Amino acid sequence: MEWQLPIQKLEIGNINIGNPWAREYRKEYIQKPMAPLSYFGTQFRLPFVSLLFPPLPILEYNVSTGKIVLDMMETNLASIKLNTFQDTLINAIVYHQYAWFKSNYSRDDIKAGFQPIYENNTLILHCPAGAGQAAHAGQAAHAGQAYKGPPIFKNNVWENCIALHDLKVGNRIRIAVKIHGISFLNRIEIARNTTNLLADTPIQHHDTVQWSGKSRLQHRIQGIILQA
């Protein structure tokens, strides 16, 4: 597993937020640009933000969407760090939005359009394992059946398959998450050539790109440690 920074030791001032338009042009990237996140420590630099969370009880796991919700009520310092991290990103979007998208949303609008990973003392992530894969195969998910997912450490060994009972409500897990950046959803209005009826010449229009006001953290679960 890659190097992880415990959330309690996260220094907000060490996080760098890049320009979402710095990457090379790709058609699909225009619709969903991403501002990359990196972390500059005193003795190391990471081209992403990679966090390790303390043991947290599972409150919810939606097998169809992969949404997993963990309780952070008992981790005061970790909760403060994560909440501050999220607020810092929202403030950065408010500050940079005009330079990036020529938009002028209010902070409330941007916060409402931001898909949170921290809300009401819970950690909310995407864990693509379980019934989502069974659904694609037209099968029902079974608690004891194992599915491809993030690496999980249980019974003193690392495994590459997760059984649904591993993620049942009440289980305590440590989770490592790599955050690549802030993903933005743009609206693209496709303009079409029209004709000037008087001059009988085509009028050229260009596609317009407008930020929808919606954003989320592009993240990936790197590993799960199931607590005994």
Image (tube, rainbow, N blue to C red):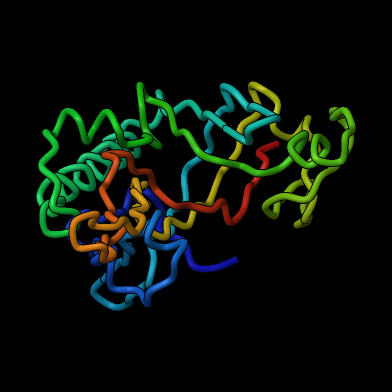
Q: In which quarter of the image is the C terminus?
A: top right
Q: Which residue is drawn at 56% across and 43% down?
A: 174
Q: Position of residue 6 (x, y in %)?
A: 41, 53
Q: Residue at x 57, y 33 (%)?
A: 67
Q: Where is residue 154 in the image (x, y as percent from the top left)?
A: 75, 46
> Is 189 or 200 nearer to us in this picture?
200
To which quarter of the image does residue 107 belong? top left
Q: Is residue 174 above or below residue 15?
A: above
Q: Position of residue 27 (x, y in %)?
A: 44, 66
Q: In this view, does 161 lie above or below 41?
A: above
Q: How many marks?
A: 0
Q: In this view, does 72 lie to the left or right of 105?
A: right
To which quarter of the image does residue 49 belong? bottom left
Q: Is residue 26 left or right of residue 209?
A: right
Q: Is residue 3 above or below residue 54?
A: below
To which quarter of the image does residue 2 belong? bottom right
Q: In this view, does 131 lie above or below 104?
A: above
Q: Position of residue 211 (x, y in %)?
A: 27, 47
Q: Is residue 161 left or right of residue 109?
A: right
Q: Residue at x 38, y 44 (%)?
A: 216
Q: Which residue is drawn at 76% across and 38% down?
A: 130
Q: Is residue 155 left or right of residue 42?
A: right
Q: In which quarter of the image is the N terminus?
A: bottom right
